[in-house]
Structures are given as C-alpha cells and as structure tokens.
Image: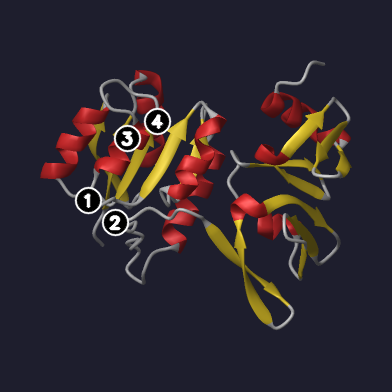
C-alpha cells in the first residue's frame, strides 16, 4: 500500500517534532517535509506533492491563512495553532480539522480518523479542498424525513436528550435524532465548547459568562461540575 505523504509546518521546533513523532507512530504515513515558515511551505508544495499538510497559523514571512489563500491547489489540510480565534478561518478554508496546541495524541488520532473517513477504498484520502474556499461552512443533519443544511455560523447552542438533540439557531430550532456525542464529533473543538453533558455552545455566540453559567442568545445555560475545569481553561475564567 502506498504510504501517505505528510508535510509539517511550524516555527516552533518542539511542536514540529511532536507532530512528527505522532505521525511516525502510524504505519501507513511518512513525513516528507518539515518547514519552519510560510515561504518554505509555499516552495515545498511547488516541487513536491503531499497527501496531508499540518499547518501552523502564526509563522514568519507568510502565515498559514495567507499561505493557503495564495495557493491555486490546496492539499488536504489540518491547522495547528495555539489560538482559538482562527477557528472560523479554518472552517472557511475547508480544513479537515483544527488542532489546538498542545496537541494530545488522542486528539491527533481523532483528526486522522476524520482524514481517513474522507478517503477511498485504498486508504488514500481524496479531500483536496476546492479552488475557492467555502465561505459559509455547513453540515447536513437529519430532521424528520429531510436532511437539513445547517450553517455552522448560525448555531447558538445544542441541547442533548437521550437519543435526540435540539439545535438552536438564529432562525429557530432543528430536532435531529442522534446523540449529542455523535454531533459533537462533527464540530470543531475551537469553535464549539461542551459545557455540560446536555449542552454544547458556539463560542462566538457567548453574551456573558461566569463560573457556573453561560449566556448564549436569550438562554442561560449551566456549566456542569465535571466540565468546569475545561470550560475555565477554554474561556480563561477566574476560579
């Protein structure tokens, strides 16, 4: 079987080496390029074909967002960064995933599973991003007998019950019969945040928050006890 060729771009040497270590644990993958700035990536992609690009955003000479927007042909892409605020840029550029540093091996494997899910029978992903970036990223969810297009920017929060979820949007409510865990897997960790076993919120839609509750739209949602540490870290709450 042909091995999947990966390129890694990060100006932080430790982050670069960590991703390479993760990739080399996978039998069917190899690292063919290591880049420390955006221009190195640009020049590398002109001469070599890669199957998957791990790309930092804040890099010297040319940042990751500028680099991708300069390419005529975008390879399958996973962004890596320490900053949540670039999440929607990642969606708009049709990235497979958006990894927040420090990246755990478990989170890395989830991103690789997304990459492989988009692949064909020979194990090689065919996710080449379109020449024009997706302006309004969306997913489809099953509601009744229809598959409904759901624009991610319109989501306020998601409320889960035993075997269905209610998706609160700017336009109203969508009910879909799946678990909140299944829907969570389709959302970016950087744009959406699980605050309770029954609630996921869109970070950009937060109006106010404290250590026990988050206000999204007209709703005041509780932060679950077991989620308070992760929510505190994500929103930088005072303890």
Please say if 139 is above or below 198.
Answer: below
Nearer-the-camera pick, 46 or 152:
152
Residue topped by disc 2: 131
Instruction: Please give the residue where the numbered disc 1 appears in the rendered image.
Output: 72
Label whose residue precedes the other's in the sequence (4 or 2): 4
Q: Marks 4 and 3: CB-CB under 8 Å?
A: no
Identify the mark at residue 66; answer none if there is no mark.
3
Q: Are marks 1 and 4 in contact (CB under 8 Å)?
A: no
Q: Quadrant of the N terminus?
A: bottom left
Residue 232 place in picture, x, y as percent: 75, 25
Question: How far apart are the alpha carbons under marks 2 and 1?
Answer: 6 Å
Q: Are marks 2 and 1 in contact (CB under 8 Å)?
A: yes
- Is residue 208 in view? yes
Q: Residue at x 50, y 34 (%)?
A: 86
In the displayed structure, does residue 115 sit left or right of residue 159?
Answer: left
Which badge, 3 or 2, comes first in the chain's sequence? 3
Residue 165's spot in the image, x, y percent?
A: 79, 62
**Neighbours of disc 3 within 10 Å: few (<14), some (14-19), many (20+):** few
Question: In the image as oriented, which residue stretches furthest toward the front?
Answer: 171
Earlier-in-chain disc, 4 versus 3: 4
The nearer-to-camera label among 1 and 4 is: 1
Q: Could you give the CA–CA distance between mark 4 and mark 3, rounded to whole angstroms?
A: 9 Å
Gap in Å between the C-alphas at discs 4 and 2? 20 Å
Query: Does residue 152 appear to the left or right of 75 in the view shown?
Result: right
Q: Is residue 14 left or right of residue 1?
A: right
Quadrant location of the C terminus in the rendered image = top right
For the point 56% across and 41% down, which residue is it?
106
């Amino acid at each position: 079987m042909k091995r999947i060729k990966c390129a890694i771009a990060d100006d932080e040497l430790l982050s670069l080496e960590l991703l390479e270590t993760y990739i080399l644990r996978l039998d069917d993958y190899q690292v063919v390029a290591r880049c420390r700035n955006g221009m190195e990536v640009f020049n590398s992609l002109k001469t070599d074909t890669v199957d998957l690009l791990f790309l930092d955003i804040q890099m010297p000479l040319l940042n990751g967002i500028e680099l991708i927007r300069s390419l005529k042909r975008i390879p399958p892409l996973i962004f890596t960064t320490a900053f949540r605020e670039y999440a929607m840029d990642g969606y708009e550029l049709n990235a497979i995933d958006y990894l927040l540093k420090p990246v755990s091996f478990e989170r890395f494997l989830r991103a690789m599973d997304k990459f492989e899910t988009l692949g064909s029978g020979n194990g090689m992903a065919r996710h080449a991003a379109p020449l024009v970036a997706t302006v309004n990223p969306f997913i489809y969810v099953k509601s009744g007998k229809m598959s409904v297009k759901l624009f991610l920017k319109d989501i306020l929060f998601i409320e889960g019950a035993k075997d269905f979820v209610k998706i609160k949007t700017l336009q109203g409510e969508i009910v879909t019969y799946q678990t909140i865990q299944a829907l969570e897997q389709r959302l970016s960790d950087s744009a959406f945040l699980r605050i309770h076993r029954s609630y996921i919120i869109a970070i950009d839609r937060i109006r106010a928050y404290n250590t026990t509750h988050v206000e999204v739209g007209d709703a005041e949602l509780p932060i679950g006890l077991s989620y308070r540490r992760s929510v505190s870290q994500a929103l930088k709450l005072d303890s």
